[in-house]
């Protein structure tokens, strides 16, 4: 049996690993990948177990290094295995930044700073930074940044930090201004998240006129909760993003969506419009869109023809019927849970063969009306092998009638809903027959049925006698005329 050598080594060193309070300044997570530590643990490698972690989290403290501490040998940090550093609920002084930067682990790729403050108490000189860092992702969420850190005097820090950066998140960071100089430092980004900054849209408008600026590599842009009321104003700044494929404008205030031409010609593949109070969608046309999220809105109908769409999320709306799949020939995933659907399949708009084109369907938590009209829906859900209905049967409950309320629809008995199958040759009112199939709906007087089953004993058949009499009278008339 192969043993995990990491905990064994820690036990041999006499170190304690706990998930709660402990005497050690550092603790490991249960999966042994993240180490949560305070500044004392970072300064004392002999008592720290974080040298074996892949993620290091420093939290709930003030990260500051005095002149005496600055003489400490932190070179051991460079050999640590961590690829992600998290600063959570801390105050980071510039003395800490200046001292630790030269010793950051060589494998470090991501930095998340959450609910923290970056401050500059006094002007301090940065160490010489010969080349850009290897950091590719930086997230600042709920972070208060000292404005002086954005000044030209910190260009060396900016060059070091942004040199290899591909993903930048400034979420709830109080972003109020984005200038051309800052934009040029990050124009090689592939992912930019400016969500929940009321001034993010204004900032993008400001840099849209910067000469020779182009976010030519940017593929993903997040502008959630940015006080947008229309997509049209985005056209100007989006001229800087020719390769954009993912746009998140969720949690804004759109009400009615008009899809501007500038987005129709973009190579967009993913569009997130969730949580935006949308009641209508007009002119949603795209030659490339593959994933559309309209969940948590107020839509009563969705009918936009999107020939390339593969994933459609309409959860938590007010739909009373499924969208027509005739307009969505490539659709593979459909979420319509938590709407106002009383059934899935009906004779007029949706039939089982259309639903069979899906791979995944979510349609639970709807007010299903458990009567005979629901039988086709139940038959489909019980018999389909090609469609994965991931919330069936648990979330498919009856809303009416009152006697069935709360019952899983799969437990319903709908035997009384089955129509009796007519036997061969059964005559219906108004002179029509029900079989064979080729003769359905044909009047008996025009029928050319041939007897195929011998009558059983005691069975009286009258349909042959009038026919024979008619033939006999017709033949007799011809003989009389011939004579």
Image: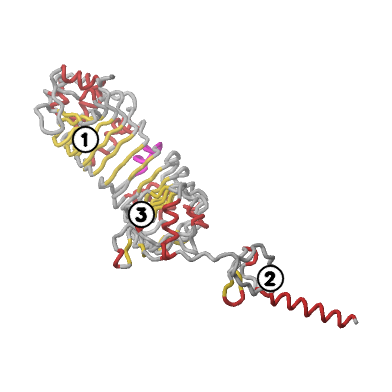
Q: Earlier in the sequence, mark 2 or mark 1?
A: 1
Question: Disc 1 designates what residue?
Answer: 87
Name the quadrant containing residue 75.
top left
Image mark count: 3
Name the quadrant containing residue 276.
bottom left
Decide whether residue 187 is among the magenta residues. Answer: yes
Contact check, label 3 and label 2, Cβ < 8 Å = no
Question: Disc 2 designates what residue?
Answer: 447
Q: Which residues are magenta?
A: 179-188
Q: Residue at x 20, y 18 (%)?
A: 9
Residue farthest along the left direction in this orientation? 23
Q: Earlier in the sequence, mark 1 or mark 3?
A: 1
Q: CA distance from mark 2 to mark 1?
A: 87 Å
Q: CA distance from mark 1 to mark 3?
A: 30 Å
Instruction: Give the secondary structure at mark 2.
Output: loop
Q: Position of residue 309 (x, y in %)?
A: 48, 50
Few, some or many C-alpha atoms within 10 Å of disc 1 (few <14, some 14-19, many ≥20)? many
Instruction: Give the secondary structure at mark 1.
Output: strand
Question: Disc 3 designates what residue?
Answer: 274
Q: Is residue 355 left or right of residue 126?
A: right
């Amino acid at each position: 049996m192969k043993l995990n050598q990491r905990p064994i080594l820690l036990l041999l060193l006499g170190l304690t690993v706990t998930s709660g309070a402990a005497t050690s300044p550092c603790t490991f997570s249960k999966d042994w990948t993240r180490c949560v530590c305070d500044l004392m643990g970072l300064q004392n490698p002999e008592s720290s177990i974080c040298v074996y972690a892949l993620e290091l989290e420093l939290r709930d403290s003030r990260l500051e290094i005095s002149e005496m501490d600055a003489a400490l040998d932190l070179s051991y940090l460079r050999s640590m295995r961590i690829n992600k550093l998290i600063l959570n609920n801390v105050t980071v002084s510039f003395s800490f930044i200046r001292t630790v930067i030269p010793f950051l682990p060589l494998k470090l790729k991501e930095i998340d700073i959450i609910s923290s403050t970056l401050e500059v108490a006094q002007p301090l000189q940065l160490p010489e930074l010969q080349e850009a860092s290897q950091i590719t992702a930086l997230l600042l969420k709920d972070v208060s940044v000292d404005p002086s850190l954005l000044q030209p005097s910190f260009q060396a820090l900016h060059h070091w930090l942004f040199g290899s950066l591909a993903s930048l998140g400034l979420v709830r960071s109080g972003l109020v201004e984005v200038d051309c100089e800052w934009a040029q430092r990050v124009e090689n980004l592939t992912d930019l998240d400016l969500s929940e900054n009321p001034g993010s849209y204004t900032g993008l408008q400001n840099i849209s006129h910067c000469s020779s600026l182009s976010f030519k590599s940017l593929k993903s842009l997040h502008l959630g909760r940015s006080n947008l009321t229309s997509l049209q104003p985005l056209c100007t700044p989006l001229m800087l993003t020719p390769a954009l494929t993912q746009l998140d404008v969720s949690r804004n205030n759109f009400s009615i969506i008009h899809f501007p031409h500038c987005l129709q010609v973009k190579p967009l593949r993913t569009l997130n419009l969730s949580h935006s109070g949308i009641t209508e969608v007009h002119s949603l046309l795209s030659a490339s869109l593959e994933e559309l999220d309209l969940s948590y809105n107020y839509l009563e109908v969705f009918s936009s023809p999107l020939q390339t769409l593969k994933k459609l999320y309409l959860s938590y709306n007010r739909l009373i019927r499924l969208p027509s799949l005739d307009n969505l020939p490539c659709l593979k995933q459909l979420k319509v849970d938590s709407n106002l659907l009383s059934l899935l399949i009906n004779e007029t708009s949706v039939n089982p063969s259309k639903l069979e084109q899906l791979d995944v369907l979510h349609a639970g938590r709807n007010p299903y009306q458990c009567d005979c009209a629901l039988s086709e829906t139940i038959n489909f859900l019980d018999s389909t092998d090609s469609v994965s209905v991931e919330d069936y049967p648990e979330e498919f409950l009856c809303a009416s009638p009152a006697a069935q309320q709360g019952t899983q629809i799969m437990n319903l008995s709908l035997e009384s809903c089955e129509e009796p199958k007519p036997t061969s040759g059964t005559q219906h009112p108004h002179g029509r027959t029900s079989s064979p199939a080729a003769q359905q709906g044909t009047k008996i007087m025009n029928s050319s049925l041939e007897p195929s089953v011998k009558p059983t004993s005691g069975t009286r058949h009258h349909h042959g006698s009038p026919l024979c009499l008619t033939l006999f009278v017709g033949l007799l008339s011809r003989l009389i005329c011939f004579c």
